[in-house]
Image (cartoon, helix red, strand yellow):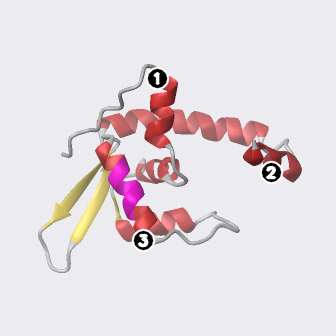
Amino acid sequence: MAKAKTLACGCPVAAFQKMISGKYKLRIVWDLKDGPRRYGEIRTGLLRGASGSAEITPRVLSRELKALTETGLIDRKDYVVVPPKVEYRLTRKGKSFVPVIAAIRDWGTRHLAQAGPGEIAGMAAE
């Protein structure tokens, strides 16, 4: 297992924000809650429900997966087979994060459904 990167910061909120910053990290962790996934499955999962968003580039996905591995939220398992096979799965730390994402999802379901498109766009601009 990769050594988890420590986030030296006096504020837990700022450390948390730094750990999960990025466009896709929350969605990757959320998709891995159902079990291990291969790179292509993760990529396909990110494209589901992404209406209007551009396709994720391999470089960006690789960078996000590497960052999540370094922070200890996911684990990468390499199988010594031909063709190469790699799986990503949540660590114990990553599994403990799933309820947090579920709470964010529930909040969004309750509150963003009430907001009109203009209000959501205004939130993104802030």
Q: Is residue 56 above or below residue 102?
A: below
What's the distance in space between the residues labelled 1 and 3, CA to CA? 31 Å
Say which residue appears at 52% left-offset and 52% top-offset.
27
Of callouts 1 and 2, which one flags the residue occurring earlier in the amino acid sequence? 1
**Quarter occupied by the C terminus:** top right
Q: CA distance from mark 1 to mark 2?
A: 28 Å
Question: In what quadrant of the picture does the N terminus appear?
Answer: top left
Residue at 36% across, 66% down: 39
**Residue 15 rendering spot, x and y as whole percentages:** 45, 30
Q: Amino acid at mark 3?
A: Pro
**Could you say which quadrant of the image residue 60 lies in?**
bottom left
Q: Tag 1: Cα neighbours inside 10 Å, few (<14), some, or many (≥20)?
A: few
Mark 3 lies on residue = 58
Mark 2, residue position = 121
Give, as a three-letter code, the residue at label 2: Ala
- Residue type, numbered disc 1: Pro
Q: Position of residue 75 (x, y in %)?
A: 27, 49
Residue 96 seen in render: yes
Q: Is residue 40 above or below residue 12?
A: below
Magenta run includes residue 16: no
Mark 2 residue element: helix
**Distance Cα–Cα, label 3 vs label 2:** 27 Å
Residue toward you, 24 or 41:
24
Element class at badge 3: helix
- The answer to which of marks 3 and 2 sits earlier in the sequence is 3
Name the outermost residue toward the front.
9
Q: Where is residue 100 shown, x and y percent of the image? A: 52, 33
Q: Closer to the N terminus: mark 1 or mark 3?
A: 1
In the image: residue 27, left or right of residue 19: right
Residue 90 position in % (x across, y down): 34, 46
Q: Which residues are magenta?
A: 62-67
